[in-house]
Amino acid sequence: MLFPTETVYGIGTNGLDEKAVEKIYHIKKRDRKNPTNLLVSNMAMVEAIAQDISPIEYKLMEVFFPGPFTLILKRKKIVPNIVTANSDLVGVRMPDSSIAQKLVELAGVPIAAPSANISGKLSGTVLSNVIDEFADYLDFAINDGESKIGIESTVVRVIDNVPHILRPGFITPEQIKKIAGKVILEENKNSISPSSNMKHYQLHVKSTLVYSQNNQKMVDTIIDISKNHTHCVVLCCTENAKFYRTEKSIKNVISIASKTNLEEYTKKLFSYLQKASSLSPDMLLIEGVKKEGLGIAIMNRLLQVCNDNFIEIPIL
C-alpha cells in the first residue's frame, strides 16, 4: 500500500512478516544493508517490538510521539532481520497523521514503511509523483494531497543517555536539547539509520549547491557559474528570484519559498527539485540556507542531491 504520513508518502506492509517486507525491498530496489523503520500507533506496540527502553528514551517518545521523529531502540526477536539489516536495533516512529495512525491501528501490527520512492530517487511528497512507479505492485493507494512537512523524520539514537542525531529532520537539535539537556549531531554516516549509508536523492542532472551568509556574494557566484552553461536552472529563495530572472544565461528560475520560512521550504523541497530536474538542465544551481534549526536538515538533503558539490563563499 502507498499512503501519506506528515513527513513524506510511504510504501508499507506488515513489518513483522519477513516475506512481506522482502517484497517492499524488491519493489523499491532497496539494498538489504539499508534498514527500514517501523510505524506504530501506541506505546504498547513500541514495547512489543523494543526492549530495555531507558527513561530518556521514554521521555523523548513522550514529547515527540506522535510526530516526525524516529527513535532507534533495542529490538525484540519478533522483529525480522530484514527490517533491521541484521542489527540488534530498530527504528520506531509514531506518525502524526490520522491516516497513517489509523492504518497501523487497523493492521494491528507495526508497518514497515520506507519512503515511497525507488531507491536513489527523491522521496515522494505528492502522490502523483510516485504512484506510476509502483502501480503494478500496489493493493491500494491513499491520496492526502501534499505532505505537510516534506522531508523524512529526524532519526535519533540514545547513547550513554545522550541523544545522537543520525539523520537531521523537522525535529531540530535545539528541540531535542531542551528535553535531554544535551544532543550530538553525528557527522559520520551510520548504517543503523535508514538510508544514511546509501546513495540517495540522485537527480541524474549535474547540480551544485552554493551558499554564503553574504547574500550578494551568493547571488553573484551563481550568476557567474551560470554563464559557463547553455541551459542553467536556478532553485532559490523567493527574495532572490528577481536577480536571476534578468540573466540571459539562466533559462529557468524556480523560487521555492522565503528564506525566512524554512517550514515552507521543507514542504516544497522535494517536489521542486523534481520539477527542476524535469527541465533537463545542463547545470542546476541551488541556493543553500544557514545550517541552524531546520536549515541543518535542508542542507543535509541538498548536499546529497548535489553529491557534495558544494561551494561555500566566506563573508570576507
Image (cartoon, rainbow, N blue to C red):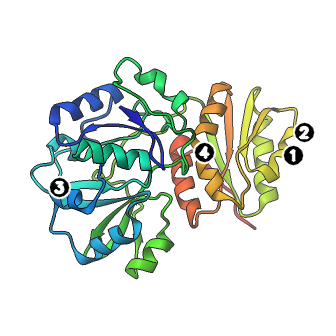
Check disc 4 and give the amino acid type: Leu
Q: Earlier in the sequence, mark 4 or mark 1?
A: 1
Check disc 3 and give the amino acid type: Ile
Residue 183 location, quadrant: bottom left
In contact (CB < 8 Å): disc 1 and disc 2: yes
Q: Position of residue 230 (x, y in %)?
A: 77, 26
Measure how far apart labels 2 and 4 are at the Cα level.
24 Å
Crowd rating for badge 4 (residues with CA inside 10 Å; few <14, some 14–19, many 20+): many
Residue behind mark 2: 246
Measure how far apart labels 3 and 1 are at the Cα level.
52 Å
Residue behind mark 4: 269
Residue drawn 15% across the image and 48% down it: 79
Nearest to the eye among marks 3 and 1: give it.
3
Residue 49's disc is 3
**SS at mark 4?**
helix
Q: Position of residue 218 (x, y in %)?
A: 75, 54
Check disc 1 and give the amino acid type: Lys
Which residue of the protein is positioned furthest toward the top in this rendering? 136
Measure how far apart labels 4 and 1 are at the Cα level.
20 Å
Residue behind mark 1: 242
**SS at mark 1?**
helix
